[in-house]
Each structure stands twice: as C-alpha cells, then as structure tokens.
Image (cartoon, rainbow, N blue to C red):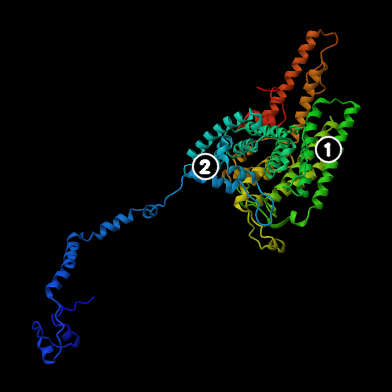
C-alpha cells in the first residue's frame, strides 16, 4: 500500500468536514465558531501505544530475517538433484499387504457382466475366513507373495517369504490330512489346489514331481468327499477345478484317471457345450492311459490284434465326436479371425508375438481355454491312433500307412488352430478394424490382464503338448518355446520356461517306448528271447545257466536302449530332472535308470 504520511491530529468533526483544525483543547475554535459540539480528538499517545506492538513485531521480524541466499549456490544444488529426489515420497504399503490384492486381481477372476464363468472364484469365499484355517492362510499368502515377487522391487525377499509360507503350509496341510474330519473340508481341498498352483507359479524344484503329487492328493480328497460336495457352489467349483487339473495330468503323463467316482458329472458351472468338451477330454485321457498299459503287456495273438483294431476304431469314433461338437457349438461359443500375419521380421520366431498365419479371437478367456483343451485332447488322440497303428503294422514302417497320413493331417490342422489362439490368450490386441461381430461383443478383442495369468496356467500345459509333437515344424517349435518363456517372464508362471526346456518327441518316442517295454515284459514273463534288436539266441543244447546269462544280457541291452531314449529326450544340456522326463515318457522309474 502507498504511504500517506503521519496520521492527522484534527478533531473528528474537522476531519469529516475536511477543514483545517487548530487542535485547541478541549474544543477546537472551528467547532466553537460554528456552534458545534467538538467530538474530541484521537489521542496520539493512544495511537502510539496501539502502533507500538506492530512496529516492534515488524522490527523483530526484520532482526530475525536471514540474509538472501546465494542464487548460484541454489542452482548448483538443484542441478545435482534427480527427479526422484526432488519429489516428496508418498507413504507406500508393504509388499506383503499388496500381495493378496495382486493375487486376487490376477488369479481369482469372478464372473462379470453377462459372463457366468470365473477362475478360482471359490477362493474368494474361503479367503474371507482364512485366518481360521492355518493351512489355507499359509498357502494363500505363499501364492500371493510368489505371484508378486517378479513385479516387486524387493522380489527376492518376497520370494523367500513365499517359500517360507509354503513350507509352513505343507506342514499344516499334512497335519490336517491326518484328521478324517478336516480332510474333507473345503479349506483343505482348496489348500492342496493352491499348493499345486504355487508350483506352477514358482517352479522352485525344476521338476513336475511336487505338482503331480499335489494333483494326485486333490483327486483322492475329492473321492473321499463323495457326491455331497456337488450340493454347494464352492464344492462344485472345486470339483470342476480338480477334474480339469486331473485331465491335464493324465494327458501329460499318461496316468489313468482315478476310479470310483463319476467324473462326467453335470454341474452348474459349465454349460452343455463345455460339459461335452469335458467328456471328450476325459474319454481321450482314459484311452491314452489304457493304450500305454496295453501295448506293453499284449502279444501278437489274434485276440490281441483284434483288441488293437478296436482301439483304432475307438479313436475314429472319438474324433467324430469332436467334429460333431465343433459343428454344434453356437456362434457366441466360436471364434473369429481378425488378423493375418504374413511373415516374422528377421525370422526371429522366439520373440515374435504372432506366428505367420491367422489370429483368432474368442468371446472370453474361458471359451478359449475350452477350445484349447479340446484341441490338445484331439492331438493326443491322434498320437494314440499312430501308436496303435505302429504296433499293428510292425515291422512295417508305420509312417507309410494311411492311418498315419490321416493323423498327420488332422494334427497339422489342429496345431494351426491352437497357435492361432495363443496371441489372444496372451493378451494380443489386433490393430485391424473390428468386424461387425466384434463390435457387437466388446469382449472379443485383446483379453484383459486379470484373465491372462490364470489362463496362462492352462495354456502352458497345452503348449507343452504341442511342442513335443512330431508334426510341428521347427519354426513352430521355436515360436512355441518362445511363448512358454513369455508365460514365465511376463506372466509369472514359472512352469512355462521349465516346460520349454523339454526335448520330447511324440508319438515317435512313445512308439520306441512301447516296443522296448514290451520286449522287457516278454523277457520277464518267459525265457523266450525277443525278436529284433537283441543279441543272437543261444544254440540248441545250451545249459540253463547259459540261457539265464543270455536273458540277462538281453535285459541289460534293452535297459541301455531305454536309457538312450531318456538321454535323447533330455537333450544335450539337460535342464530338467530325470524323474520328469521319465514320467512324461511314461517309463517306470526303475527301468534303465543310471
């Protein structure tokens, strides 16, 4: 404000009239001459007393004021600061508190909008009271921290704490399984399923042993729970989850499905088309396990030959069932091609997002998973057909048969269909214009992140089945291994890179396995030597000890051949444990072990 000088000492009347006051006291002469009552003066002493505190305050502020800082010093200090140092840090939550939310967002997908399907949604209900069940709380925290460990800055510490909780969960779950009442509880079964999921996420042991053990334990618990579990939504959802992982386990390892329970049970979670797909997958898994056992134990009698021919007929019947299922699904359950990749720059198939060919999209991730499981089962069914054909036409080369040509054509088409669906399941968003169908359904373009991680768990197993096929081209195999590595590095599913390290070839290696184990079975059953690829038979009149030595030599020879098969499957630089390779080749652990 501008300075207006010293405050006037005139009386109030003269000040209002704006005339000069002689300041005579007690009444000024101006008021006396005009016969007015002088209102008085504003005492300067009082004015000075009122102004004194303000003046003293200003004076004190001036005395305490610091000298102006050197501008060059300030600039040099600011130049040395980074952007992060210049921003005041906001309070952050610890990673342990964020982990459950992150896990729920990425691995527990509840139904939304018109979609009635979800992933692991039963966990959301059980997790609300997880503090009452230590086995579930430990494994839930372990999965949550393990899923966040790759994204958090202190991921190594978080992974260590996840492993600590996993160890506690194993002990608590083992204790609960000793109690018949706790064994059949929802929380115990959910804990076992989360233990298997933890192995999928971390792949801590670089082996499938722990995962297979957890799935087998979950199957036994489901059998103990009986049909009562289907009366509740949580029980029905967990039954479906165990059934799905049991199918994956059987298709991967050739293990027979558990008996004593009707796995093809209609439930409220899946619709009719998904239930039909489940039935096809279950029958394929059962046939695959049956053939793996039968081709080892049968001989070339007319009855056994008819049994093998019946297997071939069952394969054709099941394949026709798959074709009818694909033709009967409604339009919203199908897929649509929205893009076409012409080539891969620099032939870098490992890092290519899309393999040359079409790109298909689906209504949601759940529909894509159903199709992937059905197609994977069809590929396994074709392998069963080729194995039965190879046994039936021995010693003729099975690759010259009509059955092999048909199976190769079907496998090639199905592999192309699966590869076309992979970009969508990993979150690919097409750059092309939406078609009229996709405009009506906004869900049919580029999947959301919250659905990708759980979908990637199922996709990793299907891609493992694809990469091992003889009918996959080398470029396709390199691309599939690259996608498995992406599932591990970007989506946090540790089993992706682990499965990418396998070097198994199907059905050629399984055909070799069938022949070697069949010869070993014949040696153990009788003293008659096998037909081919064995040393010469002993001469007539040879002693019994010589025959025993001959039999032992033949057995050692065949076991060495089994060992060579395992070595070939492990590759030049083995990165997967021996148990996993022998299990995937459906070999007994005690035959050909070195």
What residue is rendered at 23% in x and 59% in y?
Answer: 70
Of residues 361 and 58, the one nearer the viewer is: 58
From the top left corner, tell me how far across and down residue 243 is, in percent.
72, 39
> Is residue 572 or residue 524 the one in the foreground?
524
Circle 2 sits on which residue? Answer: 149
Q: Nearer the viewer, residue 78 or 98?
A: 98
Of badges 2 and 1, nearer the viewer stands: 2
Neighbour class for label 2 at 10 Å: few (<14), some, many (≥20)? Answer: many
Q: Is residue 62 left or right of residue 516?
A: left
* Residue 12 shows in this picture: yes
Q: Which mark is residue 578?
A: none
Q: Confirm whether residue 334 shows in the render.
A: no
Q: Is residue 519 above or below residue 269?
A: above
Using the numbered discs, state the Cα–Cα distance from disc 2 to disc 1 in whole angstroms.
51 Å
The single residue placed furthest to the left in the displayed view is: 24
SS for callout 1:
helix
Whether pointer 2 and pointer 1 mark residues with C-beta atoms closer than 8 Å, the reply is no
Residue 540: % across, % down: 85, 10
Looking at the image, which residue sits at the far right?
A: 302
Answer with the quarter of the image where residue 303 lies: top right
Kindly identify the residue that appears in the image at 83 percent across and 17 percent down.
Answer: 528
Query: Measuring 54% from the left and 47% from the top, which residue is drawn there?
Result: 101
Q: Residue at x 76, y 25 (%)?
A: 517
Q: Which image quarter is the N terminus in?
A: bottom left
Q: Position of residue 522 (x, y in %)?
A: 81, 21
Of callouts 2 and 1, the N-terminal one: 2
Residue 163 picture location, percent across and down: 53, 35
Which residue is most to the bottom?
Answer: 34
**Quarter of the image with the C terminus in it:** top right
Residue placed under numbered mark 1 in the picture = 400
Would you place residue 166 above or below residue 343 in this image?
A: above
Residue 513 vs residue 22: left or right? Answer: right
């Amino acid at each position: 404000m501008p300075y207006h000088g010293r405050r006037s000492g005139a009386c109030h009347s003269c000040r209002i009239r704006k005339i000069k006051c002689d300041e005579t006291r007690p009444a000024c002469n101006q008021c006396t001459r005009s016969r007015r009552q002088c209102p008085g003066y504003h005492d300067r002493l009082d004015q000075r007393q009122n102004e004194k505190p303000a003046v003293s305050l200003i004076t004190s502020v001036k005395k305490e004021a610091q000298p102006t800082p050197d501008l060059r010093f300030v600039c040099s200090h600011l130049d040395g600061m980074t952007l992060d140092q210049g921003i005041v840090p906001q309070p952050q939550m610890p990673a342990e508190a964020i982990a459950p939310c992150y896990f729920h967002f990425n691995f527990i997908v509840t139904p939304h909008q018109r979609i009635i399907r979800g992933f692991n949604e039963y966990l959301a209900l059980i997790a609300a009271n997880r503090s009452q069940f230590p086995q579930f709380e430990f494994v839930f925290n372990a999965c949550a921290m393990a899923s966040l460990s790759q994204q958090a800055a202190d991921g190594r510490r978080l992974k260590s704490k996840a492993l600590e909780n996993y160890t506690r969960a194993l002990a608590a779950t083992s204790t609960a399984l000793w109690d018949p009442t706790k064994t059949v509880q929802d929380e115990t079964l959910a804990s076992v399923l989360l233990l298997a999921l933890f192995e999928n996420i971390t792949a801590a042991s670089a082996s499938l042993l722990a995962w297979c053990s957890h799935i087998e334990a979950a199957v036994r618990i489901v059998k103990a729970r009986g049909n009562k579990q289907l009366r509740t939504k949580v029980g029905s959802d967990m039954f479906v989850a165990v059934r799905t992982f049991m199918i994956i386990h059987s298709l991967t390892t050739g293990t027979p499905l558990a008996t004593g329970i009707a796995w093809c049970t209609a439930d409220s979670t899946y619709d009719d088309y998904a239930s039909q797909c489940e039935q096809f997958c279950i029958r394929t898994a059962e046939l695959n396990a049956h053939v793996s056992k039968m081709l080892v134990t049968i001989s070339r009698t007319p009855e056994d030959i008819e049994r093998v021919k019946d297997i071939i007929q069952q394969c054709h019947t099941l394949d026709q069932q798959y074709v009818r299922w694909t033709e009967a699904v409604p339009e919203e359950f199908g897929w649509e091609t929205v893009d076409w990749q012409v080539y891969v720059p620099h032939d870098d198939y490992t890092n290519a997002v899309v393999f040359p060919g079409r790109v298909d999209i689906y209504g949601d991730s759940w529909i894509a998973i159903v199709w992937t499981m059905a197609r994977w089962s069809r590929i396994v069914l074709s392998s069963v057909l080729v194995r039965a054909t190879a046994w039936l036409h021995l010693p003729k080369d099975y690759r010259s048969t009509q059955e092999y040509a048909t199976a190769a054509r079907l496998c090639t088409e199905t592999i192309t269909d699966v590869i076309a669906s992979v970009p969508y399941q990993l979150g690919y968003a097409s750059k092309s214009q939406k078609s009229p169908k996709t405009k009506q359904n906004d869900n049919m373009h580029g999947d959301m992140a919250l659905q990708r991680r759980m979908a990637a768990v199922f996709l990793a197993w299907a891609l493992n089945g694809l990469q091992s096929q003889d009918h996959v081209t080398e470029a396709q195999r390199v691309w599939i291994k690259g996608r498995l590595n992406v599932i591990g590095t970007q989506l946090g599913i540790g089993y992706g890179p682990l499965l990418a390290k396998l070097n198994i070839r199907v059905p050629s290696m399984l055909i070799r396995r069938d022949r070697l184990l069949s010869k070993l079975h014949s040696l153990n059953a009788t003293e008659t030597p096998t037909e081919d690829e064995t040393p010469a038979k002993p001469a007539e009149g040879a002693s019994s000890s010589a025959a025993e030595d001959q039999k032992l030599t033949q057995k050692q020879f065949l076991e060495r051949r089994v060992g060579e098969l395992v070595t070939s499957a492990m590759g030049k630089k083995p990165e997967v444990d021996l148990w996993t390779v022998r299990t995937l080749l459906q070999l007994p652990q005690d035959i050909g072990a070195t």
